[in-house]
Image (tube, rainbow, N blue to C red):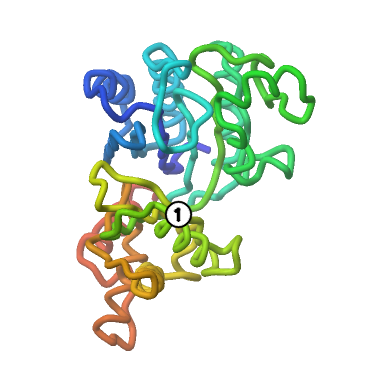
Amino acid sequence: MAGYLVECVPNVSEGRRQDVLDQIQAAIQEVKGVAVLDRHADPIHNRAVFTFAGEIGAVAEAAFRLIREAAATIDLRTHRGVHPRIGAADVVPFVPIGETPMAVCVELARRVGRRVGAELDLPVFLYGEAAQDPSRKRLADVRRGEYEGLVQSIVDDALRRPDFGPSRLGPAGATAIGARPFLVAYNVNLRTPELATATAIARAIRESSGGLPAVQARGFATADPAIQQVSTNVLDTARTPLHVLFAAIEREASARGATVVGSELVGLVPTAALADVARDALRFEHLDADATIESRLLSRTFERWRG
């Protein structure tokens, strides 16, 4: 499997203590051959998202070190935030880049999960394409009940036993490790004092409620009591492009007396997703990610590196 490139986008349950986030990032950067591409922290969610990439061996080692550092510095017994979570290193997905097969990320997730369970004595749940149990394919199902609900159910309920590691929770909780395609985390902020408005809009647009395909959504409060947020994960931007999602949220907000004040990405986005937006907005007959100078250059560099 040498030569394959992989992205890792771990979410850790800390968004307030910058010194802790610096320690976690340093643990990633200690690994030669890994590039940290982004770090996004939110104090209201009390959560941070790291994005790094490299060859599979280096990424596997960096992911393990991140989990180890997060487990040593974050205590779920005192953690409070609006985002669902089961652990210090809450979720660690591996994403194939370029021609890397999904099977490579599946094997990588299982290998790292096995090591985390054995060496760190942490419960590990495999999810996404790496799930060994179909009931764990969806991350929301793995996180059901969050840390507080999992404390007892991991002991009492055979269906909640981890794939690796002990059937008990310590201060660092559990970790969900998986493999998935690119996912775009995209949030839209609304001017309204009512969290119920954001929650209703999220319910209207998400696929599970009959809304837009490949869209997951929830309503969250922000630090500003006059601003609420519709937080989304877009699992496939070819099925629901970002501008289509934005327009749907804006339409639903207007119907409820709210206005959109802006939007944001959490982490990074594939160039193809932005090309889709530009193609529609500017009415290009043809436009894809390879039309940008940077993408073309990176593509040729990758071909020479692999060759």
- Looking at the image, which residue sits at the far left? 293
Q: Amino acid at mark 1?
A: Asn
Depicted 193 relative to depicted 42: above or below:
below
Q: Position of residue 198 (x, y in %)?
A: 40, 57
Q: Position of residue 305 (x, y in %)?
A: 34, 47
SS category of the residue bearing label 1:
strand
Horizontal arrangement in the rendering, residue 163 relative to residue 109 (left or right): right
Depicted 237 relative to depicted 60: above or below:
below
Q: Position of residue 175 (x, y in %)?
A: 54, 27
Residue to which mark 1 is pinned: 233
Depicted 44 relative to depicted 118: above or below:
below
How many numbered circles does the render carry? Answer: 1
In-front residue for pair 162/4 = 162
Horizontal arrangement in the rendering, residue 260 relative to residue 101 (left or right): left
Dot 1 alpha-carbon crowd within 10 angstroms: few under 14, some 14 to 19, many 20 or more: some
Depicted 190 relative to depicted 95: above or below:
below
Viewer can see residue 98? no
Hey, which quadrant is residue 114 in on the image?
top right
Horizontal arrangement in the rendering, residue 292 relative to residue 176 (left or right): left
